[in-house]
Amino acid sequence: MSTFIQLALFLGTIVLFTPVLGKYMKKVFSGESHPLTPVLGWLEKGIYRICGIDSQEEMNWKKYLVSLLWFNLFGFAIVFVLQLTQAWLPLNPAKAGNTSWHLALNTAISFTTNTNWQSYSGESTMSYLTQMMGLGVQNFLSAATGFAVLIALMKGLTRNVTQSLSNFWVDLTRAVVYVLLPMSIVFALFLVSQGVVQTFSRYTDVTTLEGVKQVIPLGPAASQIAIKQIGTNGGGFFGVNSAHPFENPTPLSNFLEMLALVLIPAALTYTYGLFIGSKKQGWILFGAMLILLCVGLGVSLYAEYAYNPALHIAGSMEGKEVRFGVTNSVIWSTTTSVTSNGSVNAMMDSLSPIAGMVTMFNIMLGEVIFGGIGSGLYGMIAFVILTVFIAGLMVGRTPEYLGKKIESFEVRMALIAVLAPAVCILIFTALAVSTQSGLSALTNKGPHGLSEIMYAFSSASGNNGSAFAGLNTNTPFYNVLLSLCMLVGRYAVIIPMLAIAGSMAGKKITPVSAGTFHTDNGMFLILLIAVIIIVGGLTFFPALSLGPILEQMLMHTGITF
């Protein structure tokens, strides 16, 4: 299948399903009747009864935030303890030992923050119980947390002079019961039909055709792969993720696993348009995301198919998924880095310097090109607020968005949400390249080594989870610093965005007038993309110049690292 047909099929399917799924999610989070109400309504109501939740009670932004933080802390504690005790717990046929404290800390924070950074290989480190009860459960709940924050923000933007946003427990429950759970069940059954393993059996010892003994890892993989793709969680049941044939066996599973990464984040733009009463607003955000995705895909494909003077070939297959070809590896690498997913079907480290830079740049923009579930769109709203503010300064008018004034508080909060992860990336990268603890875990030297370190901190701060190879991050130094990055990347964005939601909910909606700056046209689309690139991207230009850009130049002289 040609590259053009594959791209057209992939992008066309996203566009086709965006309004369908977006309309369904609007009904779910508005409390309206929808096709799954008679099927799963009992489960939603049962959760409320068991947990003592009053579904009619609403929270202000501070109470909403406190509920979210306590819930996430509880989830972190469970995953942390499971790793430290898994050797003594059941469902551990491979006899995996207890993890170190710093790996347990890193992994627990990783899965709680929807990052799924893995400083370990799943099949050799984690028991079945830890994979299911710890990591698998957090794949649902961390994704649902992103859903909940976005719902609160949308209600804050559309409500008129009130302190009430929504109910965190209701939003969380509806996200799991009506969106994540049914989609994951259907997708897991499909994956099993394609050959993805789903079993509690012990690992199998086999003799290969060459007469070599080999251990074949098994496990309840399909169920976790389904939610880690649909929930934009990332990582993998197996260490090499979807390059493993037990995780991604066929071309069809490969296509649908890639598609699953972006379906919900894309559809949420349509949900947003319905929530605020303007489908055009939603399509503008979708358009900005799609344009940036297509540019990244175009640059990456060109870089990978171009002649490589160091290897003296074009279309290098080094590190690529040989079953699916260069195009599918590039689509996956670009899609996984724009959706805060982080799973891979090829090695990021083997991409050409420019293609590797695209994946890094996608994350550095703040994971707003579709991004994680909920988190991508509320991150994009931060850029929308900055764009409206800058446009207001340009035309000399008080900036407004959706009929509400954008004032200094909202701008400060939006800047914190945009710049906090960037600060982590640059400061911790500088610390790593200037200390023995940071350099001792590095395999490659020169600009490629810098890229490996910078990508790791970008991935953690962007809650992405993917990684370049060549850097051993399972050390106290990296596990602790990456944990800090993941916390900042998650909560230094959630807290200011909920604060914006609370502030905007308390404001009066003013009618549209002749002086209103419109945010539903092509001019705003162009301005928004410009602000994303300038504010979110140019911050990293000096660092990228010393890493992948320099490496690309040296590659043309025949020098590799």
Image (cartoon, rainbow, N blue to C red):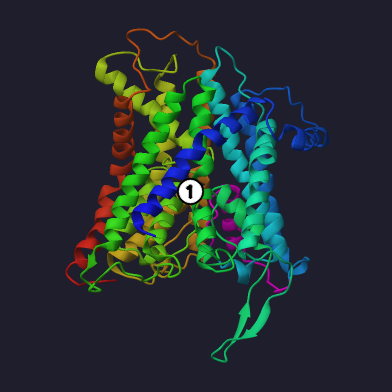
Estimate how packed mark 1 is, as few (under 14), some (14 to 19) or many (20 or more) residues with alpha carbons within 10 Å.
many
Q: Can see residue 430?
A: no
Q: Give the side of residue 46 with respect to residue 10, left or right.
A: right
Residue at 68% across, 76% down: 203
> Which residue is the site of mark 1?
340
Would you say residue 235 sits in the magenta stretch?
no
Please provide the residue range marked out in magenta: 93-118
Residues 175 and 522: in front is: 522
Residue found at the very far left of the displayed protein: 557
Task: Where is residue 258? Give x, y as percent.
Answer: 49, 53
Quarter of the figure with the C terminus: bottom left
**Which amino acid type is shown beneath numbered disc 1?**
Ser
Task: Where is residue 350? Give x, y as percent.
Answer: 36, 67
Quarter of the figure with the N terminus: bottom left
Could you tell me which secondary element the residue under label 1 belongs to? loop
Task: Where is residue 489? Give x, y as percent.
Answer: 48, 44
Would you say residue 99 sits in the magenta stretch?
yes
Residue at 54% across, 61% down: 118
Residues 22 and 46: in front is: 22
